[in-house]
Amino acid sequence: MKRSTFRIAIASLLSFASLVVIVSPLAADAPASPAAPRIDSVVISVPQPQAVSPAVIWFDDFDDEPLAYTESDGPNVDAEAFGGSGRSMLSHYPQEGRGVGNRKVFFGDSPTGKVVRRGETFTDVYWRIYIKHQAGWTGGGPAKLSRATSMVSPNWAQAMIAHVWSSGEALTLDPASGVRDGRIVTTRYNDFANLRWLGNRPASNFPLHSTQESGRWVCVEARAKLNTPGELDGLNQLWIDGRLEAERQNLDWRGDYDGHGINAVFLESYWNDGSPVTQSRWIDNFVISTEPIGPVVCPRNPELIRTPPAEADGATSWQVEVATFAEPQRLVWRSSPITSGDRVRVDAESGQFVDGQAARNSLDPDRLYHFRIRQTAGNGRTSAWSPWHQTVRTAAE
């Protein structure tokens, strides 16, 4: 290398090094933006439609002592509840423990258990819960969350099972059949060796068991529709936060067997490998129905509850936007900056109706809406908007 070229190269390196020395401290001293919060829950209408709908097989808001479940493990607690009041079912995980907390409902043509709607046959069943993981939840998903099944004998032999199970931080459907050539081949509960597994893909995109989605209530609804005997037209579906996240079509749940329908739904806590730390999650607003259930119903001026800000965020104010859930999405309300408290009411006093609705003072009746939220810290920096979430339906006129 020529001496002049060498000198130019050295000079360039020294200039770059000086730039790094000068720029790096400035980048390190830049004020950080706070994390995006979430809407924890919404104050709901009382009573909910599920309390009186003839399509509903079972409804439990956990505000009273445990109902007449066939099995009930774990208490109802008032430490957490959707909407900020009432109680919920506790699922608790001591470190390395597999979890405490379950409810088992038997109905219809079940040959065992404390049976509700006895004698009816159900071939298409929806079940919905709201679930909240302790803020800072870690370790991904406990293996079990819920299942619908067809009990065919007093010792709990099963014709089919619609599992809603964890897949890392996500949820997945894992349907299984206990029928071969029109015969029940299972001999007991969870007779895995004799089950015919129908496939557990895809998993949800929504990371229900992630740390970033912990600390707020999330709506989870599933559906199991038995195939017409002899046909391949069974269905298994999963919705999270109002969105269809997983679906299995053309399922052969039962061959041409028609001796029993779907007759039990279980809520579960079992964590196969045990929890890495001591932590809890809660379940509320449990519904089993023959029709789609959807999210909770709230007043047309809903009161929204945000997740508590982390002390490190140094939040001084927060703001909410409301949009229609159905596509094309339409922004309808924006709050003013909120400088105190963790609640805001969607009305003309707390913010402004937009998109041609300036003269209004409430949301439309019987419509799905969802929300997003951001916060501003004392250093003047504002978080990103949260994803749109916490879908609700407004009350009818």
Image (tube, rainbow, N blue to C red):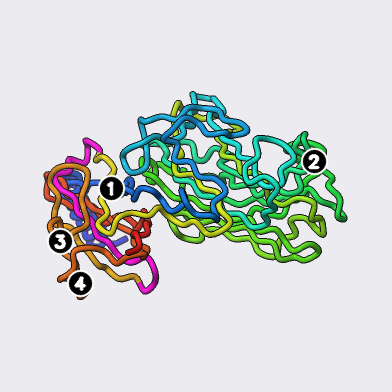
Q: Secondary structure at mark 4?
A: loop
N-terminal label among 3 and 2: 2
- Of residues 103 and 165, the one nearer the viewer is 103
- Of residues 192 and 252, the one nearer the viewer is 252
Query: Looking at numbered disc 2 in the image, what kind of residue is underneath it?
Result: Ala
Which mark is on residue 37?
1
Query: Can you tell which quarter of the image residue 367 is in?
Result: bottom left
Q: Secondary structure at mark 1?
A: loop
How far separated are the C-alphas under marks 2 and 1? 45 Å
Q: Residues within 10 Å of mark 4 (few under 14, many from 20)?
A: few
How far separated are the C-alphas under marks 4 and 3? 10 Å
Which of pointers 1 and 3 indicates the residue nearer the eye?
3
Q: Secondary structure at mark 3?
A: loop
The N terminus appears in which quarter of the rendering? bottom left
Residue range highlighted in magenta: 310-328
Q: In the rendered image, which residue does mark 4 sit on?
A: 357
Measured from the top left, where is residue 184 in percent x and y? Answer: 83, 47
Q: Is residue 96 visible?
A: yes
Q: In the rendered image, which residue does mark 2 sit on?
A: 193
Query: Looking at numbered disc 3 in the image, what kind of residue is underneath it?
Result: Ala
* Picture residue at 30% right of the left edge, 71% below the top: 330
Q: In the rendered image, which residue does mark 3 sit on?
A: 348
